[in-house]
Image: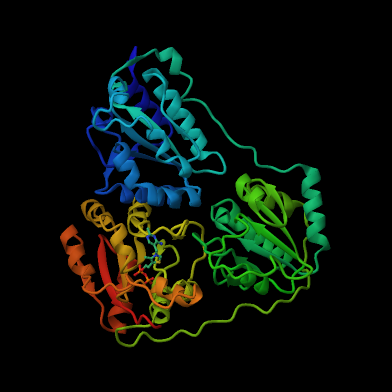
Amino acid sequence: MTTVRETAHELLRTWGLTTIFGNPGSNELPFLDDFPSDFRYVLGLHEGAVLAMADGYAQATGRPAFVNLHSAAGLGNAMGNLTNARAAHTPLVVTAGQQSRAMIGIGAVLAEPDLVRVPEPHVKWSFEPARAQDVPRALSEAFHLATLPPAGPVFVSLPLDDWVEQVDPQEVALLAGRRVCSAGAASAGLISELADRLGRATAPVLVVGPEVDNEHAYPLVVALAERLWAPVWTAPVPPRCPFPTRHPLWQGVLPSSIAGVSEHLAGHDLVVSLGAPVFRYHVYRPGPWLPPGAELLAVGADPHAASRAAFGDAVVAEVGTVVEQLLERLPTGRTGRQHPGRRIVEVPEPGEAPFTADAVFAELARALPVDVPLVNESTSNTVQFWAHLHRSRPRSLFFPAAGGLGFGLPAAVGVALADPARPVVAVLGDGAVQYGVTGLWTAAQLGLPITFLVLRNGGYEGLRGFLALLDVKDAPGLDLPDLDAVGIAAGYGVPGARIATGAELAAALRDAATARGPRLLEVPIDPTS
Ligand SMILES: Cc1ncc(C[n+]2csc(CCOP(=O)(O)OP(=O)(O)O)c2C)c(N)n1
């Protein structure tokens, strides 16, 4: 016989889940007892930060991550960032400790009979094993389900007395060797139908989304765009950067309104959406879904997104595989298509603080090599951010997928943990910092090479921008005076500096590419810029 804990450790090892992102309480201590020396526990000081660290780590590695939270309270604290992980389709095995089985029903402290309901809307599956002996198989189900497309977080509730229970090794022996995979290829008939449709289009356009941002699909989608010589837009509100931003076919990011999307796609007869929900709108500006004469064909892994769309045809499949199949069918040679190309943005010199957001992002693009991963959680200036962005490889940009603040700072910690030799830059609003601020402590303790670039505009300027759009005259709660990000960082053990001149900004951003530890730079920006 062996214990549930030993069995779980063995399984986690075979799945590569030896990094545990957590914040412990008494319900979780029996799981952490006898912690194996080949495992790593990454402590976050608040569960929101813990969840986002795991999310950043999983998105950067392309592998699932394991999270261990404290009962209902800890799980509740992580809910905001769970919405981001769900929207990002991040494979996460989220667990929380439950009270001893004998005390769950009698209202003991830290017992939560409905624990599985807490994360329910934001996970693919939520489960509490019926017996201690079922814990290993439940973890196996969670691991496979989290990873299968569309990937996403799952939740398992783990009663604290289960870990020392005995389990028959015969019962769990075959779990470790199981391979569960999704076969994402389309039939030959479907591929020839899609290829014919593309062949008939006179002015096709590609709209690319976050599912394209992986090592398999990214180069294939570039090849498809080049084969068709079709312009490429990034789908609205992008959480990742799925196409090289300096490629001559890239047009920019589609606006996040119904009318805006159809206006920007005017002149096209076939819109091919790859790996994006159709579409992730934000501002309600009604209009036609598509310009006159256009049809839409969407390929993506999420059956909910495919079914939910209000228009167009959809194929539920892995994007890279379908594009690979299409490339085998489509004729080679130039299509003779012309398109206008993207307007090149003028690059202003930063001058003195307060800087314009444009100037800061232009400097960032100049100073930062494309292999330095970027995390962005700065909201009022995303248009300027994307206008200057220079990215040319997958998994190089991460933004909160559901728009929930509190992802950026700790996600940068997770991205850095994915490859500690590679520095990371996180661009954060002065408001956004506060939602995930405890991630600074983990960055300092682990000595991670992250430059936190805090854009200080003294308010929730992204929200102020919505006042006119929503016909709101004025609203309280939009000013953020007297916040000292450098002082706060010092309290967590992260050195900081205030940037006053363009020369200081350029030097600090150049240093970011070779950073050896965390650093916070407070950069004053003009809120009206
Ligand atoms: C968890 C959460 N709470 C509140 C919001 C609403 N919200 C959207 S943008 C924003 C302002 C963020 O301010 P800051 O980070 O300073 O960036 P700025 O908009 O000023 O560029 C707020 C509060 C949110 N998106 N997520």
Quadrant in the rendering for residue 365: bottom left
Q: Nearer the viewer, residue 64 or 45?
A: 45
Specify how the rendered protein is coloured.
Answer: rainbow
Q: Quadrant of the N terminus?
A: top left
Q: Residue 192 location in percent, x, y?
A: 81, 50
Ligand 1 visible in quadrant: bottom left
Q: Residue 76 location in percent, x, y?
A: 34, 44
Q: Is residue 309 visible?
A: yes
Q: Is residue 77 above or below residue 503?
A: above
Q: Residue 462 location in percent, x, y?
A: 41, 72
Q: Nearer the viewer, residue 227 or 236?
A: 236
Q: Is residue 529 above or below residue 201?
A: below
> How many marks overall?
0
Drawn side of residue 344 relative to residue 130, left or right: right
Q: Is residue 450 above or below residue 388?
A: above
> Which residue is found at the position 33% from the left and 53% from the top?
420
Drawn side of residue 526 relative to residue 188, left or right: left
Q: Is residue 21 visible?
A: no
Q: Residue 385 location in percent, x, y?
A: 45, 73
Drawn side of residue 142 relative to residue 251, left or right: left
Q: Quadrant of the C terminus?
A: bottom left
Quadrant in the rendering for residue 406: bottom left
Q: Nearer the viewer, residue 237 or 98?
A: 98
> Which residue is found at the position 39% from the left and 83% from the top?
528
Quadrant in the rendering for residue 412: bottom left
